[in-house]
Amino acid sequence: MRVLDTAALLYWPVTEIAGGVCSISQQNELERVSPQRYMLVSSIDIDWRDVDPSWLEKARVAAADSGDLPRLSPVDVDVLALAIGLNLPLYTDDYRLQNTMQKAGLETHSVGTSGAKKVWKWELRCTGCGSKEPVPTDVESSKKGPVKDCDICGAPMLLKRAK
């Protein structure tokens, strides 16, 4: 058994994705991105699962620990939670998911890329006073820009690679 990210659902042959474990939230994402592929994937034997809330919390903690949480979508967190909760390998091309899994010491494989070569640690850094802090587990998801405001000076805090 293995957990499949949406990239596998989109690009792998149907014989490869049959029997995979996926989050129910991936269905909407797949339908939005590729309605034709969604129709095909819907006819395949995939283990669609709701994510246990305790697994979600473990996934948020792991993603906050690596610093990747602010750049993961809710669907990404669901997929991560399945892999962590079921203790299964995750197949994804998402470098942030790979980074989180590798930092947590869990198995991950690439779908169609060479995959993440190194594990990076991310932190929040203030654009004003320069203070640094770890990524909290309650941070909102955003594709780019500030993650939150600094508790010390109020300036925006950006996600930066920890040195």
Image (cartoon, rainbow, N blue to C red):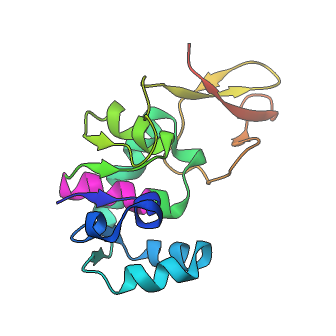
Q: Position of residue 49 (x, y in %)?
A: 29, 75
Magenta highlight on residue 85? yes
Considering depth in this image, is 58 or 27 the residue closer to the camera? 27
Residue 82 versus residue 118 in the image, above or below: below
Residue 63 versus residue 88 in the image, above or below: above
Residues in magenta, as a range: 77-87
Residue 46 seen in the current view? yes
Q: Residue at x 53, y 30 (%)?
A: 134
Residue 29 versus residue 86 in the image, above or below: below
Q: Position of residue 121 (x, y in %)?
A: 49, 25
Q: Position of residue 104 (x, y in %)?
A: 30, 35
Q: Quadrant of residue 12?
A: bottom left
Magenta highlight on residue 100? no
Residue 58 versus residue 125 in the image, above or below: below
Residue 52 seen in the current view? no
Horizontal side of residue 45 vs 81, given as left or right: left
Q: Position of residue 28 (x, y in %)?
A: 52, 79
Dominant secondary structure of the residues highlighted in magenta in the image: helix
